[in-house]
């Protein structure tokens, strides 16, 4: 999975486009059918928001400065 992010201001990063997560995953719903692009985008967006990626970006940016 990958997504673009932007630094809005010092200490604040966000997804550049919440519906533009790139992945090679094929998602299936609870009934076993492949999710369409819209349903997949919603699920992937929720997944990204559950990950601690912003903390890691801040850590990487802080290391770059120091």
Image (cartoon, helix red, strand yellow):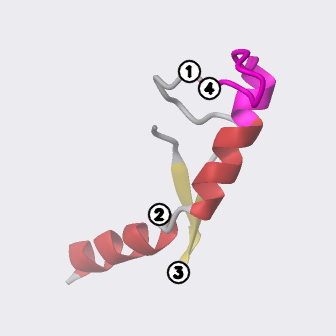
Residue carrying label 4: 27
Classify mark 4: helix, strand or loop: loop
* Prevailing SS of the magenta stretch: loop
Residue in the foreground of this view, choosing between 10 and 52 = 52
Q: Residue 9: where, in percent of width, then height?
A: 58, 74
Q: Is residue 52 left or right of residue 29?
A: left
| C-alpha distance separating marks 4 and 1 | 4 Å
Q: Is residue 60 left or right of residue 39?
A: left
Residue carrying label 2: 53
- Rate crowding at label 2 as few (under 14), some (14 to 19) or many (20 or more) other CA atoms within 10 Å: few
- Magenta highlight range: 27-41
What count of labels does the image hold? 4
Question: Looking at the image, is mark 3 or mark 2 nearer the viewer?
Answer: 2
| C-alpha distance separating marks 4 and 2 | 21 Å
Question: Looking at the image, is mark 3 or mark 1 nearer the viewer?
Answer: 1
- Rate crowding at label 3 as few (under 14), some (14 to 19) or many (20 or more) other CA atoms within 10 Å: few
Q: Is residue 47 above or below residue 52?
A: above
Cβ atoms at labels 3 and 4 below 8 Å apart: no
Q: Is residue 35 above or below residue 7?
A: above
Q: Which mark, residue 11?
A: 3
Residue carrying label 1: 26
| C-alpha distance separating marks 2 and 1 | 22 Å
Can residue 19 be seen here? yes
| C-alpha distance separating marks 3 and 2 | 13 Å
């Amino acid at each position: 999975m990958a997504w673009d992010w932007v630094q809005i201001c010092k200490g604040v990063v966000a997804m550049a486009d919440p519906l533009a997560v790139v992945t090679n995953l094929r998602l299936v719903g609870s009934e076993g059918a492949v999710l369409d692009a819209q349903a997949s985008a919603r699920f992937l967006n929720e997944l990204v928001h559950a990950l601690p990626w912003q903390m890691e970006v801040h850590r990487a940016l802080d290391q770059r400065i120091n």
